[in-house]
Image (cartoon, rainbow, N blue to C red):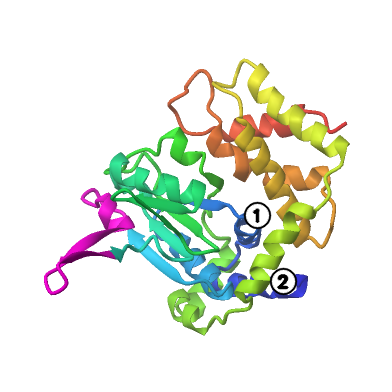
Amino acid sequence: MRARLDACLHAVNQVLLGKEPQVRLALACLLAGGHLLIEDLPGMGKTTLAHALARVLGLRFQRIQFTSDLLPGDILGTSVFVKDSGQFVFHPGPIFAELVLADEINRATPKSQSALLEAMEEGQVTIEGATRALPQPFFVIATQNPASQGGTFALPESQLDRFLMRLSLGYPAQAAEKALLLGDSRRSLLPRLEALLEHAELALIQAEVPKVRASDALIDYLLRLVDATRSQPQFACGLSPRASLALLAAARAWAFLAGRDYVIPEDVQAVLPAVVGHRLRERVDPLGPAGGALVQWLLREVPVL
């Protein structure tokens, strides 16, 4: 099974050049059953990464382009009156897919952003008084441009907390960008990607990830990290229990990808920036961008033992 996962990583890395750590984190996020937020400047490969993951994992894919005039019904679906039958017939929206790309999510209004909350938390949506289950598996990969760019609406904390991880791809290294310029278009490579996992295999892996062992000492280290965010004065607010669970789930998925059935502190440290970076704010500027400096402080100051 891990050979299949290695093949998935290799295939995506052939499309998204020079971003091996981010690709591994993104796959770990999905194996842990979480949703992924990718924040970066336009043109960095955010959409390409989402397409590539959907293809190698064999997931039915839908893309929603978030704009300021997008309505919740455009995401969830709506009922249309059929004259011949005299009844309303529900037409599912693009949310009814296995992997949904919420492209440029912070360009939509908070009302439209909130349409994803129930779907991401409970795997279902309530429309016109009826609750409808979403496909399984169900993942949301959202992209957003930096808040400093015009025409954006910052995601509220309640929305950010639904994302297991937040990643930034960044500029490619010079060697990777040279290969990008000399090679085929990345978009032209996407149709060549084959599904490397079946739904049953993906479900089996997701069921195995929570079984990866975490010792009492490892849990104590994780709790020290969380407690530091709640007790130290530079943090505007501490991490929630949901964040603690997310950190453990991500560390287990990272260990599983490494071929181990147990978690080590290095697994927690590897996923910590992606899992907690978007959940933390500095007390001196609680409305400012999430602080990478706070994560680095945790890694440096909180003892492993």
Magenta stretch in the rendered image: 66-90
Q: Which residue, as the protein is rendered here, is positioned at the far bottom?
A: 192
Q: Nearer the viewer, residue 144 or 73?
A: 73
Residue at 26%, 54% in the rendered image = 73
Under mark 1, the amino acid is Ala
Quadrant location of the C terminus in the rendered image: top right
Extreme-top residue of the structure: 233
Q: Residue 294, position in %: x, y?
A: 62, 29
Asked if one can make out residue 40 in the rendered structure from this viewpoint, the answer is: no
Q: Residue 277's quadrant in the figure?
A: top right
User: Can the viewer see residue 57 in this picture?
Assistant: yes
For mark 1, give the secondary structure.
loop
Give me the disc on residue 6.
2
Disc ID at residue 32: 1
Residue type at numbered disc 2: Asp
22 shown above or below 289? below
- Report helix, strand or loop for mark 2: helix
Q: Residue 37: where, in percent of width, then height?
A: 49, 50
Mark 2 or mark 1: whose residue is earlier in sequence? 2
